[in-house]
Amino acid sequence: MSQKVIIASDSTSDLNETLLKRYDIQILPLSVALGGKNYTDGVDIDPDTIYAHYEKTGELPKTAAPNVAAAEAFLSRLTADGSAVLLFTISSDMSSTYNNARLAAAGFENVYPIDTRNLSTGGGLLVIAAAEMAEAGVPAAEIADRVRAMTERVDASFVIDNLEFLHKGGRCSAVAAIGANLLQLKPCITVHGGKMGVGKKYRGKFSKVLETYVADRLGDGTDVDSSVVFVTHAGCDEDIVNTCVERVKSIVPQKQVHVTRAGCTISSHCGKNTLGVLFVRKPK
């Protein structure tokens, strides 16, 4: 009888409840410090609470990786029945979560920490791919090898309506923030080599910018792995989200377009009214 394989992720993968339940994905949450209190991402705090607090006080939260002890306790619970575990984390260039997971995993057999080299559903794409492989009976070590080889093919990007959170969080200079706001620029934040960078800068109304952005990222759709595409947003208007989903469907003959809401960790850095289309490109 083959060994059971459990797929786990830190909370930054931003997978919705439907997907978590469908694949029985286990979540190791990051922590969120706000207003003098400590919270657990996705458990006792949500992004709307963060936005409301910021509007009232001007204070942004601080997020922190699970420490080694927390990761050890998490893995101990999952491996108690002899299961193998793949634990996916946000890029090691953005957080210490992967390193802590790696240190924790050293005390277990058949535990595979995976550095997604990504964030949000960019990592979630790898989590879902691994879950599909596990359901098909692929051994844990082989799944780990396959998804690590996929990391460079993940296309993750977001368009940000307002640079205020990035600026306040130290990720955007004041000059850039002021200039973008005055010119109505909506920058596309991309992920390459595990790090965030600025891609194309759009100008105009957010809803119209997003339609152009979707077309730019997907092109004619021929090199897009259509099995799973994510439209992930941080508190965007439902009509805007639905328009983007329909735009994706018009370009890519996808099997599934999943709509997800960015969790507390991602929302703390990008702010409200951020939207991205995330997918895997076909091997060249």
Image (tube, rainbow, N blue to C red):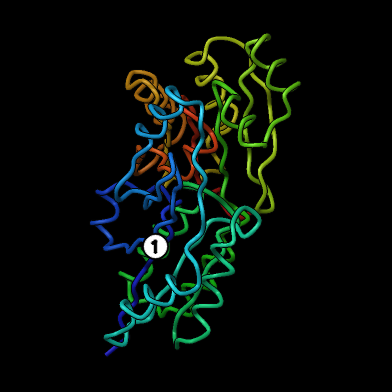
Q: Is residue 269 above or below residue 241?
A: below
Secondary structure of residue under mark 1: strand
Give x and y (percent) for residue 251.
46, 30
Q: Nearer the viewer, residue 1 or 70?
A: 70
Q: Is residue 122 above or below residue 253?
A: below
Q: Amino acid at mark 1?
A: Leu
Q: Is residue 129 above or below residue 242?
A: below
> In percent of the image, x 59 and y 56: which residue is there?
95
Give x and y (percent) for residue 59.
51, 32
Disc 1 target residue: 28
> In percent of the image, x 55 and y 33: which residue is there?
158
Q: Nearer the viewer, residue 116 or 151?
A: 116
> In percent of the image, x 49 and y 53: which residue is there?
123
> In percent of the image, x 63 and y 39: which residue is there?
190
Query: The N terminus lies in which quarter of the figure?
Result: bottom left
Q: Nearer the viewer, residue 49 or 264?
A: 49
Describe residue 105's horizontal placement relative to residue 163 as left or right: left
